[in-house]
Every structure is written in structure tokens, then in C-alpha cells.
Image: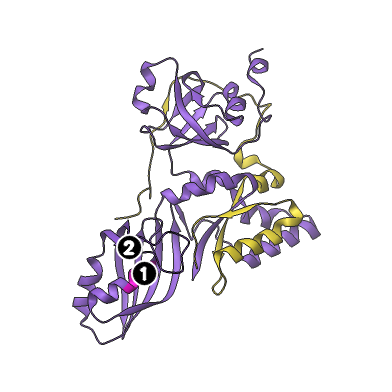
């Protein structure tokens, strides 16, 4: 009894051994805050009394000085 | 109505719709309009577990026609007078207010929703650094005024964590930039993978674990070991910007 993907464990199948070059990209847990803001998500605890859209709008306004220009949300909680 | 509302920032916006593939869990408070027999009510409510047909409410953003949705589970937590508190796991796009209304009809006494809290979205729960708008505002303040990025680092999480429940393919450094430009993932680019089925949504990752794009499987992963070329994943939306990894010819030097 649970949600469809809850606690899912997936097998990893390797086709070959290959290293990644450290000169490019950045491991997600080593992203600086600017990189994180560009590829981030916030798990918001929506307050009661305002719509999801309004919550997203307020979050966008709070984050706008940090160059966050787009905010999306998943699923409407009216 | 309160609870989990995942927000995606800037480039992460392209991935957030994937959360609709996972289910949602709510805790709801239902108020029943007349006296009822508790055993009858419980029995009728549990009849809703499984496939249901639901007509979206008048005030909704979708076409008003019956839609099939799945109720995965339902636990009645407390019955107090005419108030019934329950936990319910549902498919995305299930309206709980409507579900409660329909339950009221089925019980035969009428009911409406008093309170609703979303407690899970796909694999995200209330334990995954849930933040309020106030937390966010404070975190931005500390970062801007005091140069302390710790609170903001706690509120803002990597998008990979939100979509982690889906299968992934990890691609070679040389293949990253072409995928960033919208090209599909071809067999030589795949280094490792989680098993996936044809047409399934798959996350395309670098070997460092960064999300590059999302796409749909063009083949079943079981055939990957036997082929040397061809398309594996058709890229749908690109998240990483081009130029983070070198272009193919330069990487080959």
C-alpha cells in the first residue's frame, strides 16, 4: 500500500567503465548558490488562504533580486 | 488548503511537470451532514479505493468530462461526531473536494471538505526540507544582507532530488553538449542506465549526476546490450544550458 513510485529501488546496469572529466560541469552537491538557484526547487509548505498561483508569485518576488525570473509549480492546491 | 507545493526555479521549470507522474497523498477533514453509522461510513469510503470516475469541479482549469483516476489507498484516522479525518493516496489530477462530495452521496448523508493538507508529492514528503514563504524570505535576507548562504542552501534544493524516482540514463561527457542542443541520446553515448520500457519518461544525467534533459525511451532498455547504434532516448525538454560540456569534436582530442 503506497504511491506508485514510493520507495522504488532501481538497478543500475553499466555498459562500460568510463570516467567523467573534472574540467566540465559540477557535481550537484557541489553547486554554488547561484548555480543551485538556476536548477533548483523549493518544497514549499503552502499557507492556507492563498492560491497556489499566488504562493508561487510571492516566492518569485522574494527571489527576484537573486535573478530568479521564472517559477513553476506542480499541482494546484486551491 | 496547505501542504507540499513544489516550486521550480529558472531552468528547473522544464522538469517539474514530471512530478505529475507520481502520486499525491493528502490528509483531509470531511464533515458529514447527518447522523451516520460508523461501520457503514467506513465501508462506503473504502469502496472508493481503486479506479474511480470523477467529474472535475465547475471551478477548475480542465475540461468538465468524467476522468478515470486511481485512489491508491485510504486510511480513516479519526471519527469525531460528524467529522472524519482520513489519509488518502491518489493519482495526480484527483480532486479531493469532489471525492469527499461523492463519498457523502455514497454514504447517503452528504458531506463536504473542511480542511486539506498535501503530505506527499511523488517521492517528496514533509521530511524533505519543507519551507514556508517566511523561511524563504528570511533565507534571502540572510544571503543578501549578511552574506550567509546557509539558510538559502537549505531552502533551495537541487531539482534532481525532486525527479529522482524516474529511471535514468547516464551519458558520456562527449554526448552531453549535443543533448543540450536537443539531439537524442544514441547508443554510444550511454554509459549506464536504470532499466526502462519503451515510451517511458527517462531522465538524462551526466556521469556527475547532473540532469541534462528529460526524454522518452525510443527502445526497451533490455535491447541495449545487443545493439551498437541507434536512438535510445528522444530528448523532450533540455534543462542544462549548452556549453557546460565541450562540443563533441573538442572532447575527442
N-terminal label among 2 and 1:
2
User: Which residue is label 2 attached to?
Assistant: B54
Residue B132 visible? The answer is no
Residue B231: x %, y % from top left: 45, 23
Which chain's residue wears label 1?
B
Q: Is residue A74 above or below residue B12?
A: below
Q: In the image, is B55 to the left or to the right of B122? A: left
Q: Which chain is purple?
A: B
Q: Residues within 10 Å of mark 1 (few under 14, many from 20)?
A: some
User: Which tint is chain A?
Assistant: yellow
Say whether marks 2 and 1 touch (CB < 8 Å). Answer: yes
Residue visible at 40% across and 68% down in the picture: B57
What label does residue B25 carry, if any? none
User: Which residue is label 1 attached to?
Assistant: B98
Q: Is residue B2 above or below residue A56?
A: below
Q: Residues within 10 Å of mark 2 (few under 14, many from 20)?
A: some
| Magenta residue span | B96-101
The CA distance from mark 2 to mark 1 is 8 Å
Residue visible at 28% across and 72% down in the picture: B103
Amino acid at each position: 500500500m503506497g504511491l506508485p513510485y514510493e520507495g522504488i529501488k532501481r538497478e543500475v546496469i553499466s555498459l562500460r567503465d568510463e570516467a567523467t572529466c573534472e574540467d566540465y560541469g559540477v557535481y550537484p552537491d557541489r553547486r554554488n548558490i547561484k548555480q543551485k538557484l538556476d536548477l533548483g526547487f523549493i518544497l514549499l509548505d503552502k499557507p492556507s488562504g492563498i492560491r497556489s498561483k499566488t504562493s508561487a508569485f510571492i516566492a518569485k518576488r522574494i527571489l527576484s533580486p537573486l535573478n530568479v525570473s521564472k517559477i513553476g509549480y506542480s499541482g494546484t492546491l486551491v | 488548503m496547505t501542504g507540499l507545493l513544489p516550486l521550480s526555479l529558472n531552468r528547473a521549470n522544464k522538469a517539474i511537470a514530471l512530478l505529475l507522474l507520481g502520486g499525491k497523498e493528502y490528509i483531509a477533514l470531511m464533515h458529514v451532514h447527518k447522523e451516520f453509522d460508523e461501520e457503514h461510513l467506513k465501508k462506503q469510503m473504502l469502496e472508493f479505493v481503486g479506479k474511480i470516475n470523477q467529474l472535475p469541479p465547475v471551478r477548475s482549469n480542465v475540461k468538465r468530462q468524467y476522468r478515470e483516476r486511481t485512489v491508491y489507498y485510504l486510511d480513516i484516522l479519526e471519527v469525531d461526531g460528524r467529522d472524519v479525518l482520513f489519509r488518502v493516496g491518489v493519482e495526480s489530477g484527483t480532486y479531493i473536494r469532489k471525492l469527499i462530495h461523492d463519498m457523502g452521496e455514497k454514504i447517503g448523508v452528504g458531506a463536504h471538505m473542511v480542511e486539506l493538507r498535501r503530505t506527499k508529492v511523488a517521492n517528496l514528503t514533509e521530511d524533505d526540507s519543507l519551507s514556508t514563504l517566511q523561511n524563504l524570505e528570511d533565507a534571502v535576507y540572510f544571503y543578501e544582507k549578511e552574506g550567509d548562504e546557509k539558510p538559502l542552501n537549505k531552502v533551495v534544493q537541487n531539482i534532481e532530488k525532486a525527479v529522482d524516482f524516474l529511471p535514468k540514463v547516464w551519458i558520456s561527457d562527449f554526448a552531453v553538449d549535443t543533448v543540450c542542443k536537443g539531439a537524442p541520446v544514441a547508443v554510444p553515448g550511454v554509459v549506464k542506465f536504470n532499466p526502462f520500457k519503451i515510451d517511458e519518461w527517462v531522465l538524462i544525467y551526466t556521469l556527475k549526476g547532473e540532469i541534462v534533459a528529460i526524454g522518452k525511451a525510443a527502445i526497451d532498455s533490455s535491447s541495449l546490450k545487443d545493439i551498437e547504434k541507434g536512438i535510445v532516448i528522444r530528448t523532450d525538454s533540455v534543462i542544462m544550458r549548452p556549453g557546460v560540456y565541450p562540443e563533441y569534436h573538442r572532447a575527442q582530442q
